[in-house]
Every structure is written in structure tokens, then in C-alpha cells.
Image (spheres, rainbow, N blue to C red):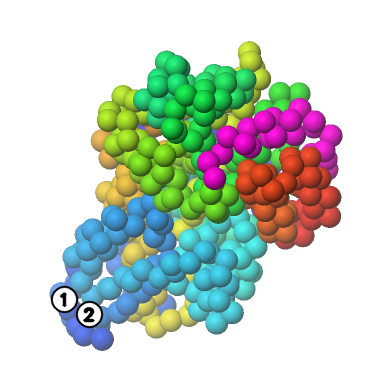
Amino acid sequence: MKKFIPLFLVLVMAIALFAGCDGGTTTGQTTTGQTTTKSGETTTEGTTTDAPREKVTIEAFMVGDDWVDEWPAFKAKFESEYDWIEVIEVGTGPEAGFLQSRIAANDIPDIVSVDNTEVSYQALDAGLIQDLSDKEVTKNIPQAYLDAFTRDGKIFGLTQGAAFTCLYVNMAALKEAGWDAPPADFEELLAVCQDLKDKTAYAPLTVAGDKTTTAWMVYEGIIANEVSPDWGAGVYEEKFLAGEINFTEHTAATEKFNKIAPFFMPGSATNKEDDVTALMTDGAAAMAIAGNWTAKGLVEGITEAAGSEEDVAVILVPFNDPGEQVWISISPETAWGLSAVDEDDNIEEAREIYFNWIMQPENFKFVQNARGTVPVLTTLTEDQIVLPEPIKAVVPAMNDAPFVLMGFNLWTEVFRDAACTAIRDVISGNMTAENAVKVMSDTLATSNRSEG
């Protein structure tokens, strides 16, 4: 785990600025960790009960597209250890719609995916999500990541890992276009895109525009590399939260946006993340802007398209000017929270057991390794961490790069919707970058984080 510590340190400096903004019976099993029920009974690690248990069912809203294939094995492992508990997956739609409907019913899933969004805040403020401050497993998450999911002094989620922006490159495609190395800066990125367009059948670029986090990456990286070398670390975030960034003033960023937009593959604005993986697997696109959390699928897909993992490159998105260090965007990933909805003792005990179980390294590794993400759970050992080789190669550069926080740590839903719609229109050819940044500026000025 030592190689990931630098990321913890830089996040401490940045995230600290913004934290707090805001039927049957079965036999018993050995429990893991310590759980206390409402009746006062306590079970501890290594304590076994032979008494029959009433079968209970709990809900888990936690399964992402990028590790859904591992869910049957994950579920089976837990239920083999606790055969009186059945875990069912719920929540197949976007968080906003699914979770809002459950909040309205005053009944959220036992384990729930949470983010720094108004929907998650609603659940917390309504008393539907537990404060995890006193949980034993909370001690195994670095403080910066706990701060990132703290609101009004309550820790409402434990993050799955560290997220950062990447450019995934099919080097077989670039070699066909005459390039032996990935682009090092924005000028080279434009040149590579033009050569791919002129000399190959590959679309130069694609992105999951349907997902707001990745749609925003297209402009986020551009504006970060334009303003942050002058402003310094943390200023972009302060100005964003205060609604004080006038994007129209940064004409060089707007020009970059106009130049790169035509190279995106048609349909990029409505792609989902699995669409991007499919396109890279089919060899339809040469490069993809995406988060590290989709690394496993993308690396495997590009390997299939190119014929060898040696032809897969993962780099920091080169929106930097020549000779300048690249700035990236990072964030704690989506977290898992624990329901506070009153239930009978058996269900409450079951949910506590399950939450503690998923945060044990021998179980958490199912998710981390399926997703190929940089983990932050400090109890994971090196042999439990399986990262794709191209991701391992980019981690040192990521640790050294200056950064801004990803948009979802900063924006309101009003700004998110307006800005991402504008970005989609630009990469679809339906709007100029000038009009898009005006929409962003006008919306940010009247809608900032203080609304939340």
C-alpha cells in the first residue's frame, strides 16, 4: 500500500477545505467484527452460536456496472458464511430516481450507495442514514476520505477508493497513424486526433457523455490546465464553490474546447460507460477519456482490439500546454452508507454484519479488483490488490500531478444539469464552446454549493 500514500497526503490538503459543507431457520455462524443489537446482545469475532436463526433478507444498493459480474460470487461468499441472511441487489436505475423514491417512502435499502449529492444529503438529513463515526471499520479509511463524506459532523459513507481522470489509448491505432507514443500535451493530442482521422478508420476520441462525471471531464481538464497553474492548488475549488468563476473570461480554454470537440466519435454525448468499453473493444475508437474506475473493462477491451496488453496505454489526460505539468481531476469514489431505518433486531443485526463484512479486505478485494481501481482501505495488503498493469504504470504520475476536485464534489444539481447538457451539445456539434461556457458562467453565478 505504500505506493498509494502520496495520494492520501494531497487529498488531505484539498478535501479538508470542503468537508462539512454542508422466512425459515438456519444454524448460526461465526461473526466477523463486533455488532450490538437494540436488545443489547453483542457478538464478537470468533464467537459462534449454534442457535437456529430466523431467515432475514436485506437489500443492497451498491452494485455498479463495472463489477456486476462479480456480484454472484460476492453474494454467495457472504451467504455461505451467514446462511440466515439473504442479500438482494436493488436499484438498477440512476441514483437520483431510485433513491429519491425510496426516501419519499421513508425506507431506503440497508446498504446504500451515497455521493456528495443533494439526494444523499436528503437521506442523511431525514435520519435515514447512519453516522458511521463510531464503526470499527471506519478506522480503516484515511481521514481525508472520511472528511469528504462528512456533513454536519456525521460520516455518512465509506468510499470505495480514489478516482482520477485518465486517457485510455489503443497504441496499435496510434502506430497505424504514425505515432509511437501517446500525446504529451494538448498540441500533440490535437495532432494525434487529426492523424487518426486522416489515416485510419478509428474515431479519435470517445467519452461516456451520458454520465455527468465523465461528460464534465471533457471541459474540467481543459479549464483546470488553463487557470490552475496561475491560481495554485485549492483556488479553483474555492472560486467554484463561491460561484465566482466566469468561464467566458478564459478564452484559451474555450478555444481548446472548440478544437477538441470535432474529434469525438458521433454518439459520444449519449454513451454510457459500458458503451465506451464496447467501442474500445470493437476497435471503433482509438482513445477514451474515462475514470480509473472503469480500468479493468477498458484495459481488457483495448487488449482484445489491439491484440496485446502491451498496446494499451493509460495516461493522464494531456490538456496541458507544451512544457507545462498536466493538471488532473481526482475524487473519493462513490461511498457505501448504512440504513438507519428502524427494523426488527434481526434485520438491524444483519445489516450491521453485512456492512462490516464488505469492508473486510478479504471481501472488499472482490470489488476493488473487479473494478481495477486504486484502493484506499488501509487493511488491504499488496497481495490483495490486483490492478491492471497499465493502471499501475500511471499511478506514480497521478500521485505527482497537481489536481482539482471532480465536479460532483463542488456543483449543485442545477449547475450539473446545465453544464453537462451544454458539453454534450458541443461534442455533438449542436453548440459552440462560446455559448456553452456562457451557460456555465450564468448558471454558476446563480447556483453554487451554498444552496445545498
Placement of 407 over or under 180, stated as above or below: below
Q: Determine which residue is flagged by label 1.
A: 27
61 or 36, nearer to the observer: 61
Please tell me which residue is depicted at 49% across the width and 74% down the height of the picture: 108
User: Does residue 110 appear to the left or right of 409 in the view shown?
Assistant: left
Magenta stretch encompasses residue 7: no
Question: Can residue 168 be spotted in the picture?
Answer: no
Residue 20 in view (yes/no): yes
Q: Position of residue 328 (x, y in %)?
A: 59, 32
> Which residue was labeled with disc 2?
53
Observer-nearest of 435 and 445: 435
Rendered residue at 22%/80% (across/down): 53
**Amino acid tagged 1:** Thr
Q: Are marks 2 and 1 in contact (CB under 8 Å)?
A: yes
Mark 2, Cα crowd under 10 Å, few <14 / some 14-19 / many 20+, is some
Q: Which of the numbered marks, if any, corresponds to residue 391?
A: none
Q: Is residue 203 above or below residue 192?
A: below
The prevailing secondary structure element of the residues shown in magenta is helix
Q: Work out which quarter of the rendered image holds the N terminus and state it.
A: top left
Relative to 429, is 349 on the left or the right?
Answer: left
From which residue to which does the magenta span run? 243-266
